[in-house]
Amino acid sequence: MTTPQPCARCGNEIPAERLQALPETQVCVACSRAMGGEFTVYLTPERISKEGSLKKNYGGYTTRKVRKPIKPAGGE
């Protein structure tokens, strides 16, 4: 069981269920909605074609999550 922690934006307690689902979260659900999500996710297609080939063969995708800046709730 995870220990509840305070939200980095408003100071309210983040529910244990949210921390179990997203262990890296730092904001509560209400603040996440207000911010438009806590992370920006970038997808990059992986090219598996031969070097110099004009044919573009793509394999899977590489994902990268970047945390949005967290400003205090009153600062918007």
Image (cartoon, rainbow, N blue to C red):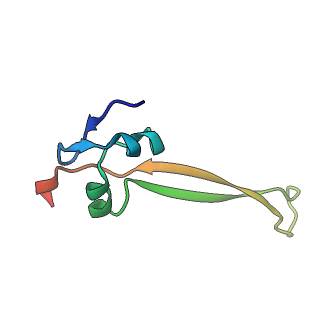
Determine whether 67 is above or below 59 in the image. above
| Residue 67 x, y percent position in the rendering | 40, 48
Residue drawn at x 31%, y 43% as measured from the top left:
15
- Residue 60 lies in quadrant: bottom right
Determine whether 6 is above or below 65 in the image. above
| Residue 53 x, y percent position in the rendering | 88, 64
How many numbered circles does the render carry?
A: 0
- Residue 52 lies in quadrant: bottom right
Residue drawn at x 45%, y 40% as measured from the top left:
20
| Residue 48 x, y percent position in the rendering | 83, 56
Toward the left, the furthest residue is 74
- Residue 25 lies in quadrant: top left
Residue 41 visible in the shown view: yes
Residue drawn at x 82%, y 67% as measured from the top left:
56
Side of 43 where 76 appears, left or right: left
Determine whether 63 is above or below 57 in the image. above
Image quarter in which the N terminus is found: top left
Residue drawn at x 86%, y 69% as measured from the top left:
55
Name the residue nearer the viewer: 35 or 50: 35
| Residue 37 x, y percent position in the rendering | 37, 59
Side of 67 where 46 appears, left or right: right
Toward the bottom, the furthest residue is 55
Name the residue nearer the viewer: 69 or 26: 26
Image quarter in which the C terminus is found: bottom left
Side of 50 where 59 appears, left or right: left
Residue 7 visible in the shown view: no
Name the residue nearer the viewer: 2 or 47: 2
